[in-house]
Image (tube, rainbow, N blue to C red):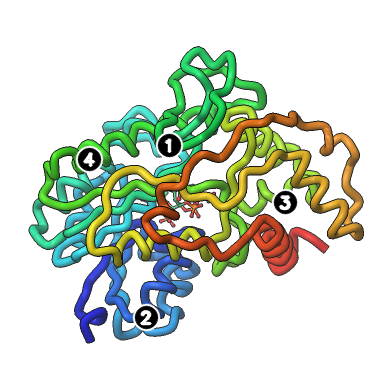
Amino acid sequence: MEKMSCKVCVTGGSGYIGSYLVKKLLQKGYTVHTTLRNMGDHAKVGLLQSLPNAETRLKLFQADIYNPDEFEEAIKECEFVFHVATPLHHTEGFQYKNTIEAAIAGAKSIAMSCIKSGSVRRLIYTATVMAASPLTDDGSSFKDSMDESCWTPPNLSLPYTNSFVEDYTDSKTLAEKEILSFGNNNNGGFEVVTLACGLVGGDALLSYTPASVAVLIAQLTDNPYHYQLLRFLEESLGKIPIIHIDDVCEAHIFCMEKPSIHGRYLCTNSYISSAEITDYYQKNHPQFDIKPEYLNGPKRKIKWGSTKLIEEGFEYKYDTSMILDDSIKCGRKMGDLQ
Ligand SMILES: NC(=O)c1ccc[n+]([C@@H]2O[C@H](COP(=O)([O-])OP(=O)(O)OC[C@H]3O[C@@H](n4cnc5c(N)ncnc54)[C@H](OP(=O)(O)O)[C@@H]3O)[C@@H](O)[C@H]2O)c1
């Protein structure tokens, strides 16, 4: 009864992480407000409305980050807000010149709506490890370990880069800083948590392979664009932090259900090189014909130094092999792998 009356908002409920999170929240008994950009999109609306308990406890709202005030209605009366949505591709014709400006303005406006609501107790932002590079400020070398003290230096020119990953990295880094600023000295009257998640793999509720799963299985699909993204992550982060979708969503809910928590948390259960991923696939899934050149990645000794989330009491349930095996299952289900 208590949970049913607890309203929570998820921005971007029709995406990969958003839809999985909404499903779990409904399963656990919460009443969920979620946003999507286009209520006329029957596939996205249909997916959300078909979730168990959606009929009685899910309410959909139309909201676009390029019109950030639109989120106010969905946030009203909620105790917890998960800001999951992010602009990935720029929409022309608005006051913002790129996705970076739009993401920062969206983060600020959503935090302001939380203040205005008078009901929000905690704002939880789905951040990314791409904002937490262990590279030194001039980009010339790596620190010994990757943890919450790492922030990706601006204007780095890295191998395998392209304008999409550069804008995405900047937009997520600056939006996370904007959100965290509302938590300083309890400015907004609510707690702020940022969960910087690794590359997410595993199952999906969507009808297509999510982009992050496609990147995780790039050596199996032999897709040069996805493999380039994998290598970009490796060049930026030393190795590739990966996590299972189920752990990602459980970590979000853990951060909501704790009586008190605030600040920045990295959220990843495996820190692995692209060559090690290839090696795992070769040894455990020999039916795939994998190009030997995918074994030629860097072998760096950087350590995973983040323990904050575990110290708070969170337990990861999915290890490296479960993340990779479930990503293969997802690729097969969607028809991208044999
Ligand atoms: N997947 C990963 O590996 C990973 C790792 C770390 C962090 N993250 C973060 O997790 C979040 C979700 O990512 P995802 O992997 O689930 O990607 P996704 O499936 O592409 O979802 C992106 C979401 O953002 C929404 N969106 C895009 N442009 C928008 C705009 N202008 N206004 C409002 N909403 C907009 C989309 O809504 P519509 O459906 O309405 O288009 C969709 O719900 C993002 O913030 C991402 O940075 C993802």
Tally the numbered discs: 4
* Residue labelled with disc 1: 90
Question: In which quadrant of the rendered view does residue 153 lie?
Answer: top left
Give whichever of discs 1 and 2 has the lower sequence position. Answer: 2
Residue at x 33% of width, y 57% of height: 11
| Residue kind at label 4, given as amino acid type | Lys
| Residue kind at label 3, given as amino acid type | Ile
* Residue labelled with disc 2: 54
Residue 2 bears which disc, if any? none
How many angstroms separate mark 2 from mark 4 (CA)?
29 Å
| Res 275 seen here | yes
| Residue kind at label 1, given as amino acid type | His
Question: In which quadrant of the rendered view does residue 71 lie?
Answer: bottom left
| Residue kind at label 2, given as amino acid type | Ala
* Residue labelled with disc 3: 217
Q: How many residues crowd around disc 2 within 10 Å: few (fewer than 14), some, or many (20 or more)? A: some
**SS for dot 4:** helix
Q: Is residue 193 left or right of residue 208?
A: left
Tell me where residue 64 appears, x and y as whole percent. 31, 50
* Residue labelled with disc 4: 108
Give whichever of discs 4 and 3 has the lower sequence position. Answer: 4
Mark 4 and mark 2 in contact (Cβ < 8 Å)? no
How many angstroms separate mark 1 from mark 3 (CA)?
27 Å
Q: Quadrant of the N terminus?
A: bottom left
Tell me where residue 58 appears, x and y as whole percent. 32, 76
